[in-house]
Image (tube, rainbow, N blue to C red):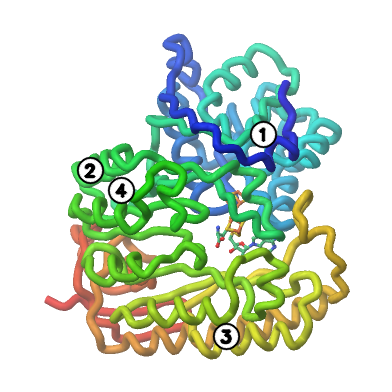
Amino acid sequence: MEMPDYKLARKRSKDKVEIRDFKIDKDLLELGLNKKFFLKTYGCQMNEHDSENLRGMLHLMNFSETLDMEDADFILLNTCSIRENAHNKAFGLLGRIKHLKESKKDIVVALCGCMAQEEGVVEEIKKKYKFVNFVFGTHNIDKLPKLLANSFKTSKLDIEVKSCEGDIVENIPVTRENKFKAYVNIIYGCDKFCTYCIVPYTRGKQRSRKREDIIHEVEELVKDGYQEVTLLGQNVNAYGKDLYDDYDLSNLLVDVAKTNIPRIRFITSHPWDFTDNLVEVIKHHDNIVNFVHLPVQSGSTRILKLMGRRYTKESYLELFKKLRSIPGISITTDIIVGFPGETVEDFKETLDLVNECKFDSAFTFIYSPRENTPAAKLVDNTTLEEKEERLYKLNELINKYSKESNDKMLDNVYTVLVEGTSTKEGNLFGYTETNKLVNFPGKIDLIGKIVPVKITSAKSFSLDGEIVE
Ligand code: SAH
Ligand code: SF4
Ligand code: F3S
């Protein structure tokens, strides 16, 4: 039994990160014969990619996947802590599983991911969800085979959550969801400690993967016919700082570009570490997509300070303008409304910033207090009703600029990576470099290829087009 511990989770030392290789006992390889698993994933792309690793390990043990929870021998929830509603969804599903387990006693149930790193969550599981078989965290997903094997032997709740700065595990098996686009981790954890955010506690300290491991993974993906990689990290712009003296994200991007993979994306960028060199590298490489997700969170410098974001409205705008000078670039953002103490004037500054930047699209959220974070202790006098009104206003503005950005694409030709058939018969769907969804008529043998498409109609959330011969 090892319980989560916030004090340990907060620690940041200069200790060297241990890199270990995934290992599995031979006698676990047949554990899943004739057994099925059901995996539910919440949260960000990093969690989705962790789930690809969880699937990889389960497949290695010969489990097969079912999309019907009632049909599963093993149910695994890979959870997210970022906002209260992510919590509620996972606990809601646990409630349903409780009923299921009353009639099917042999099902094994486990919870992992960011919620497993929270002291309060694990306490609640111990008290109210005793039917759960085991809990493990984000630092030891490679322990899944062992924990699962034990759970078939005993029904006692096992909690194995490490609250530590974290190490790196290489070569975990992976079952990728998409045949053409792949996620590649480049940096784990986060040291930014924005005051509202739980991620630094659930994911540990910033630690970069070695450049040769990343390049090797991308080279293998190229050999397997992949068309696109997304380099992943909570703060990709910090890449290399913990590992090298003179090798950062811009250098890594140049090296990944040399593999000739047709499309390279990277998420998420923090404005603080965005160098001029990085802007130049994006500008001068055809296979680094013209797309940057640059979360601003607020347009008020006062609120940004309270959030611990380390930039001002002015310095954000300065960086934004540099990026906008790249021809054809698309810039998206994240915004939080209703941070403790946000006044009507602060909110107006956010709207002003949106009017100035005209983001191509944005994710918007109502602030959600998270256990153990500094912002959760701040006085918050704004009513939920007022916050919902602010969100509504903000979304109206965001949608207006999304539609404008789509309208500008009309009659122009863009490259689209074709991913599959769309619901309308005879139609295919795919994404532009700037991550816009396009539907267009075409033959299924184009799936997996990058084709030129002329945009014929623009809606708020998608585009229609036709292939240019
Ligand atoms: N590492 C990324 C974002 C990680 S979380 C970055 O720094 O940009 C994704 C988004 O969730 C954040 O950008 C933020 O807008 C939102 N978010 C994080 N914590 C939140 C909270 N407590 N309440 C509401 N939104 C939150
Ligand atoms: Fe959270 Fe800030 Fe780190 Fe992003 S940079 S993960 S918002 S602490
Ligand atoms: Fe959620 Fe954890 Fe990602 S909190 S957003 S799954 S890093």
Q: Position of residue 108 (x, y in %)?
A: 65, 26
**Which is nearer the eye, 172 or 66?**
172
Marks 3 and 2, how far apart at CA: 40 Å
Disc 3 and disc 4 in contact, CB within 8 angstroms: no
Disc 2 and disc 4 in contact, CB within 8 angstroms: no
**Which is nearer the eye, 33 or 357?**
357
Q: Earlier in the sequence, mark 2 or mark 1?
A: 1
- Residue 108 drawn above or below residue 460: above
Look at the numbered disc 4 and give the secondary structure of its residue: loop
Q: Report crowding for label 2: few under 14, some 14 to 19, many 20 or more residues within 10 A (C-alpha).
A: some
Q: Which mark is residue 353?
A: 3
Q: Looking at the picture, which amino acid does disc 1 mark?
A: Ser
The quadrant in which residue 310 appears is bottom right
Residue at position x 72%, y 82% from top?
Answer: 390
**Which mark is nearer the camera, 3 or 2?**
3
Q: Looking at the picture, which amino acid does disc 2 mark?
A: Glu
How many discs appear? 4
Residue at position x 75%, y 77% from top?
Answer: 388
Look at the numbered disc 2 and give the secondary structure of its residue: helix
Q: Which mark is residue 219?
A: 2
Marks 2 and 4, how far apart at CA: 15 Å
Q: Earlier in the sequence, mark 3 or mark 2?
A: 2
Which residue bears the numbered disc 1? 163
Marks 1 and 3, how far apart at CA: 38 Å
Which residue bears the numbered disc 4? 179
- Residue 85 drawn above or below residue 434: above
**Which is nearer the eye, 1 or 166?**
166
Quadrant containing the N terminus in the rendered view:
top right
Q: Looking at the picture, which amino acid does disc 4 mark?
A: Lys
Q: Earlier in the sequence, mark 1 or mark 4?
A: 1
